Image (cartoon, rainbow, N blue to C red):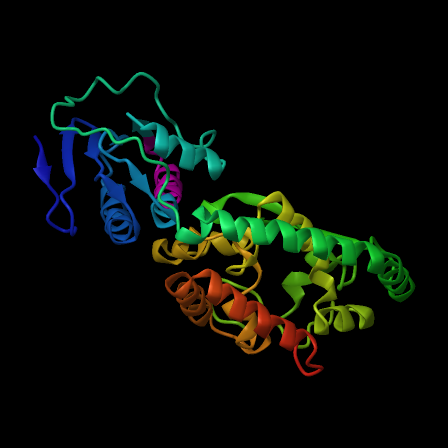
Amino acid sequence: MSSPNAKTSFCLLTTRMNSTLLVQLPPRLTVIDAVAFRKCFQQWVEDANLTKIILDFGQTTMIDSSGMGSLISNHKSAQANNIQLTFWSVQPQVKLAFALGGLEQIFNIEANTAAIIPTESRRIEQRPPLTHPSVRSLMKRAIDIIGAIIGLSITVLLFIPIAIAIKLDSPGPVLFSQIRCGWMGRRFRIWKFRSMVSNAEALKSNVPNQAAGAFFKNEHDPRITRVGRFLRRTSLDEFPQFWNVLMGDMSLLGTRPPTPDELEKYEVSNWQRLDVRPGMSGEWQVNGRSKIRNFEDVIELDLRYQQNWSLFYDFKLMLKTVMLIFNKNSGAA
């Protein structure tokens, strides 16, 4: 029997068929509805008699990063409770969002389910995934490409002296790479000049985390080499990221790209950070990133960037970034 779920700010129609629960999702799965949907799902999986949950996407034509985050969290909750989670009637624009986040292979999406549930009241809109204006801006992308080409040209000139300094200081590769999460949670490989010892990741568990929340920070991290401290103080360690900007994984200005293990700790609302492309610089850098110790402060700065974004705002942040680079007292720990 169908009934609206009164505990959410939107009308979630559910139908219970023995041990199967069919849920009709709203037209927009964005931050407010995504948070409410996550809370409902946590209640559903506590039902010991439930073995399968079907999510009907027939009306859903808009999804943002928070919507993606709620689906990922619910997918994990279903697995933890041995409940089969199946997606029905996924519209092309939502499928595209899944593909961008590399999730089409993770979610159980049943094909040819569009006609299973009555569609008389459905208005199928062909819209792309909900994106922030900065992601849609062709001018911002053009500036990124030009800036990346200039930055890579400088990187090529500096590569040999920096490589020699890194090699003389500590054994290991010149470049360091790590998987990070970008727009809509899409994973990509970030590149930097190595500023830590070569086995830094293995030693991370031995270093106290001075930050509160879903990111890691230690002001006097013992894994950082002598050359590495200079590279970080001058931001030279980040110059290889111009390649990530050229490839479109990052932007010159944006938000801080989290690691997958940090993303695992996110609440659904925290996924709003991923509504824009991550940046080499941004609010978090020009506002004393080395002093930030609370993840909620990172969220506040990232949301401030999203709310205030314009090409002129990017220009102001770029000027502040350049000023910080030439300030001997700036830099990240």
- Relative to 311, is 205 on the left or the right? right
Query: Camera-side residue: 268 or 206?
Result: 268
- Is residue 72 covered in magenta? yes
In the rendered image, the vertical position of residue 9 relative to residue 233, given as above or below: above
In the rendered image, the vertical position of residue 48 relative to residue 228, given as above or below: above
Magenta span: predominant SS is helix
Query: Camera-side residue: 124 or 75?
Result: 124
Is residue 23 visible in this depiction of the protein?
A: yes
Q: Quadrant of residue 81?
A: top left
How many numbered marks, from 0 up? Answer: 0
Q: Residue at x 46, y 49 (%)?
A: 137
In the rendered image, the vertical position of residue 2 relative to residue 119, given as above or below: below
Is residue 250 visible in this depiction of the protein?
A: no
- Relative to 304, is 61 on the left or the right? left
- Relative to 177, is 25 on the left or the right? left
For the N terminus, give its image quadrant: top left
Q: Residue at x 23, y 42 (%)?
A: 44
Residue 95 percent coordinates (x, y) = 39, 31
In the rendered image, the vertical position of residue 320 relative to residue 32, given as above or below: below
Residue 185 percent coordinates (x, y) = 47, 46
Residue 152 percent coordinates (x, y) = 74, 53
- Is residue 58 covered in magenta? no
Q: Which residues are magenta?
A: 71-85
Q: Residue at x 69, y 61 (%)?
A: 238
Q: Quadrant of residue 207?
A: bottom right
